[in-house]
Each structure stands twice: as structure tokens, then as C-alpha cells.
Image (cartoon, rainbow, N blue to C red):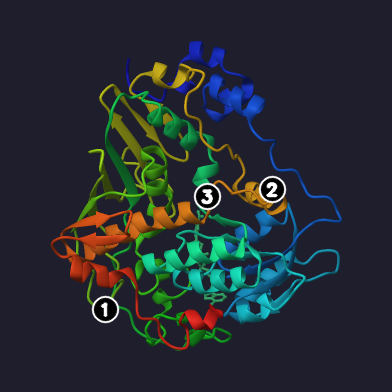
Amino acid sequence: MNSKAFFVTRRSFLKKCSLAAAAAGLPAWFVERDLAEAAPRPKRLGPNDRPAIALIGCGGMGRGDGANAMRFGDLVAVCDVDDTHAAAAAEQYGKNGRTPDKYNDFRKVMERDDINVIITATPDHWHTLINLAAAKAGKDVYGEKPLSLTIDEGKQMVKAVHKSGIVFQTGTQQRSSDKFRLACELVRNGRIGRLKQITVWLPAGLRDGPFSPSQPPQGLNWDFWLGQAPKVDYITQRCHALWRFWYDYSGGTVTDWGAHHNDIARWAVDLLGPVSVEGEALTQPIPGGYTAISDYVINYTYANGVLHTVRTTHDDSIYGGVVNEKGQRNGIKFEGSDGWIWVNRAEIEASDEALLSTPLPAGAQRLYVSNDHMGNFFDCVRSRKLPVAGVETGHRSASLCHIGVIALRLGRKLQWDPAREKFTGDGAKEANQWLARKMRKPFDYSFAGA
Ligand SMILES: NC(=O)c1ccc[n+]([C@@H]2O[C@H](COP(=O)([O-])OP(=O)(O)OC[C@H]3O[C@@H](n4cnc5c(N)ncnc54)[C@H](O)[C@@H]3O)[C@@H](O)[C@H]2O)c1
């Protein structure tokens, strides 16, 4: 059978699907189980038990997360080191004559006993300190991906969440998408035979520069924004939204888009991590410009022999939008001995439609059902159950990306011990030095009270 996206083209198959399944491009058997067996979709909380929420980091994603969370709770505080962003967020979320309180220092937010939930949507280099402070204060956290800037930070987070008993959801919302869950369930249950190769396509990063320093905009506390990262002059391209192309604050698109697609690869493989990783830069950054390698190939190997390749594409934009319609979309391809499955946010396809349309047998391995990532978090805030993307999931998937960045920066093959969370063998000494970073004072772990 051919490999076209058959859901829209094959009427016979659509007939078998419920209306909902057809609309979502999913087989009926899969959706029916969701409707019949899954936990009910998150309900709105009653007027008397709506949690009080604080949003920390009021940029592009934070503003979206805040609006999303307001379906389930009341946004009572916003915090940003840029006054302009905090003010815009406060105005956006104000309702019925009540405007959220504004803060610049997240530690003040943690002092408020009336706040139950923190949304952390700062750049990656601030995630851990804010999340550690929230755990210490006993507040539940919806923390944007990637969980951490380094593997050491992720380990600290896992410990802190366990110790405090807070509910933590990593903002990898693809775990709450039925397309990705279907792909992972099929792969895990051997639908494509023995899994051999996973190929993850990520949007390429930006390669630009050199850039010139300028005065920080009024209202932005640049030193606080830099936090643990080295002290440098303000450059527009280092700051809002573009920080993700600098290794001081991020891992480039390996940890940006990779935090989503590599997480799905790991969900299907069902292992803590690979045993080897090799990175190759296809271009080098421009001196004085963005530092993160924009075009690359990373090859991981798992203990069961599965290969996992990560490649960049220029055919989708850094926001995931289509640049070249005929080109390579970002997404994940699973190839096995008996066929393949391709999945991304827009579609799921297979080498043979029967691979998707044939129901899994009774007793097949099924995965955690969540169809609303923010809703699943607030459900768990009430039930105290583990969310679909808990801290260990966030940590292990971020670690997969981090070791990829380390191999890429060192330009070599490395052996990884996922149980001990250390590199071993040739090159291990140098690579292990990248597991943690020197944090600029006073923005080290003690800043979070940890
Ligand atoms: N889940 C997703 O699909 C998705 C999509 C985009 C971004 N993200 C994640 O969301 C986070 C934010 O990304 P963005 O694109 O919105 O970045 P952004 O630069 O637009 O916004 C970040 C905001 O955090 C503020 N900030 C920086 N340090 C702070 C601190 N110490 N305290 C309070 N505020 C601080 C900045 O001033 C800015 O307003 C990142 O971790 C990113 O990876 C997730």
C-alpha cells in the first residue's frame, strides 16, 4: 500500500471512524478507547476551589500558558525582570476590575501563602532556580520545557520534587497529543515489527551575526535576566525570544524543538536514555553571532540496538511554520522491520494504512491518556496524581538533548551510562565537565534557597 496521508484520501477508512476520530485524523478504535476508558477530560474547578496562579516569565510562551491556565484557576500574580512584559501581562489577565500583582523578583512570589501554582516560562537558564524555589515553598509547578539547562540541574529538580511532594508537569505538550500517543503505542506494541531506526527532524537554528551591544531597554533588569550566565553587554539578539540560539541560555534547537520530538522518541523506545551519542556540526556559528550550532546531525544508539538520528531542516521555520511546502517537515519517523510511522503535530502516516487502522489487541500496552496538557496538570493538582509529563520524564528527555549538545560541541562520539548519568570511556573526562555549569554568583542554587 502506498505511503500517502490516507486519512483524508481513503473514504473506506473514514467510514469506520467516528466523526470525532475522522476530524482528528485518527483511527476510530483508538479514539473509542479514549472515550470509553480514559479518565474524564479535566473539568473546570468550582468557584470556591480555583487555585491561585502566578506566572513567572511573561514573554511569548508565558503569556499563552497564563491564558491557558486561567481555564482552571485565577491568575493573581505576574513576575518578569522586564517591567514592560510584566505590565502587559497584568493588563492582559486583569478581569472584573482585578489586576494581577506585578513582581520583578520571583522570590517575593514564593513568599505568598495564597499562591498554589507557579507557571515557569522564563528562558531555560532560569527554569531550575525558580522551580527549586517553588518546590521549597510547596507550590505546584507547570514548568516550561526543557526542564533544565544542564543534567545536574535536572537531577536537582527530580530530588526537589520528590522531597517536597509538589505536582510538577513539564511543558512538553506533545505528551497530551493523541497523534503522538498513538504512534508510541503502536511502536511499543511491535506494530512496525522490530524498531530499528528513529529519525527526528528539527527546524534548523539561526546562523547570524556579528551583533553589536546597545543599552538595555528601559525597565529590563539585564543583570537579573542574565542570572547564572556569564556577565556580558546587552545585545538585542541575546535577549527576548532569540536567547534560544545562544549556548549560555539554551542548547539551541536541540533542546528547544528537541525537547518535544526527542521526548516522543524516548516515549516510544521506553528506555532511560541511549548508551552512545555522536554529534556533527554541518555549519559553524559566525564569530560574534549566535553561538548555538544551527545545522547538525546527532546519532544516538540505545542498548537494544535502536538508532536515533536527529537532523535539522530549513523547510520549516524555527516556530514550526512551513517554509517550503515540498520540503522536509519537522517530526519523527519510526522505522521497523515491518514498516514505518511518521508523526508530527499536523499528521500521522504509515507505510500501510492497516498499521494504523487495525486495533491493538486486548492486553496491549497502552499509555497514559491526557488530551489537555494544562488540564491534566490542574487535574493532578487536585488529585495529587502524577501528571503525564512529570519531572523524571522531563529530566530524562532533557538529558537526551543535553548529551546531544555536548557531543555536538565536542564534535565526537561518546559513551553514555544512562543509569549513572555519566559519560564513560574515551573523552568522558572532558564531556563530564559539561554535566554542570559554573553559575555566576549570586545566581547559584543558594539563590533559590535550595
Ligand atoms: N511548550 C512549547 O511549545 C514552548 C514554545 C515556546 C517556548 N517554550 C518555552 O517557554 C520558555 C519561554 O520562552 P519564550 O519564547 O516565551 O521566551 P521569551 O524571551 O519570549 O520570554 C521569556 C520571559 O521571561 C522573562 N525572564 C527572564 N528571566 C526572568 C526571571 N529571572 N524572572 C522572571 N522573568 C524572567 C523575560 O524577561 C521574558 O519576558 C522557554 O523555556 C521555552 O523553551 C515552550
Q: Return the residue nearer the eye: 6 or 352.
A: 352
Per the image, label 1 sits on a secondary structure element best described as loop
State the residue at coordinates (22%, 66%): 409
Q: Which mark, residue 147? A: none
- In three-dimensional space, the C-alpha distance between marks 1 and 3, rounded to whole angstroms, equals 37 Å
Q: Mark 2 points at which residue?
A: 379
Within-10-Å neighbours for mark 1: few <14, some 14–19, many 20+ = few
Task: Give residue 402's quadrant in the image.
Answer: bottom left
Label 2 with label 1: CB-CB less than 8 Å: no
Instruction: Characterize the local packing of mark 3: few (<14), some (14-19) or many (20 or more) Cα atoms within 10 angstroms.
Output: many
Vertical comparison of 218 with 289: above or below: below
Three-letter amino acid code at disc 2? Answer: Asp
Q: Which amino acid does label 1 sit on?
A: Gly
- Residue under label 3: 389
Q: Are marks 1 and 3 in contact (CB under 8 Å)?
A: no
The answer to whether 309 appears left or right of 323 in the picture is left
Disc 3 marks a residue whose amino acid type is Ala
Q: Nearer the viewer, residue 102 or 418?
A: 418
Q: Is residue 93 left or right of residue 159?
A: right
Q: Name the residue under label 1.
A: 288
Label 1 within 8 A of ligand 1 by Cβ: no
**Is 258 located above or below residue 432 in the figure?**
above
Disc with the residue nearer the chain's start (1 vs 3):
1
Residue 358 pos. (x, y %): 46, 16
| 3D distance between C-alphas at marks 2 and 1 | 46 Å
